[in-house]
Image (cartoon, helix red, strand yellow):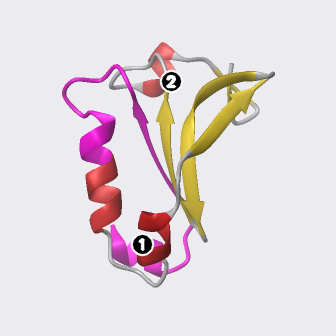
Amino acid sequence: MSSVVASGVNTLMWHGDADFDCNWVGGLSVANDLTWSGSATFKSKPFVGYNVNGTQAGQFKTQGNFTFLRVYQSGHEVPFYRKFKDNCVI
């Protein structure tokens, strides 16, 4: 995956916070282990709220073309647990 991010392709890793098998903590560990020009900056950035219609629906951090998103109240298959419309969790 490092080569994909390093190539400049916009990349999103999303994980539901209610997922036991592929949990967001493990996903964040993978994201932090990626090697690309922005990896050190990505690791040092704090999470910010991901808000939809005034309600916080998760947390994310972005560096360049790479984004990690933790989606609240979601399991292994984020779209199954949360409905998506216009690229926003609703």
* Picture disc at residue 38: none
Residue at point 61%, 25% (across, down): 57
* Picture disc at residue 4: 1
Split into 4 quadrants, where in the image is the N terminus? Answer: bottom left
Looking at the picture, how far across and down is residue 79, in whole percent?
Answer: 50, 24
Residue at point 63%, 37% (across, down): 49
> Quick one: SS at disc 1?
helix
Magenta-highlighted residues:
1-27
Looking at the picture, how far across and down is residue 65, in whole percent?
Answer: 59, 68
Residue under pointer 2: 79
> Quick one: SS at disc 2?
helix
Residue 26, image quadrant: top left
Cα separation, mark 1 vs mark 2, equals 23 Å
Q: Is residue 66 left or right of residue 56?
A: left
- Farthest-out residue, left: 21
Q: Is residue 54 left or right of residue 58?
A: right
Looking at the picture, how far across and down is residue 77, in whole percent?
Answer: 38, 25
Label 1 vs 2, first from the N-terminus? 1
Q: Is residue 21 left or right of residue 11?
A: left
Residue at point 33%, 62% (across, down): 32
Split into 4 quadrants, where in the image is the C terminus? Answer: top right
Q: What amino acid is at disc 1?
A: Val
Task: Pick the residue in front: 82 or 34.
Answer: 34
Q: What amino acid is at disc 2?
A: Pro
Magenta residue check for 14:
yes
Rendered view: 74 above or below 66? above
Task: Pick the residue in front: 24 or 1.
Answer: 24
Looking at the picture, how far across and down is residue 87, in whole percent?
Answer: 70, 36
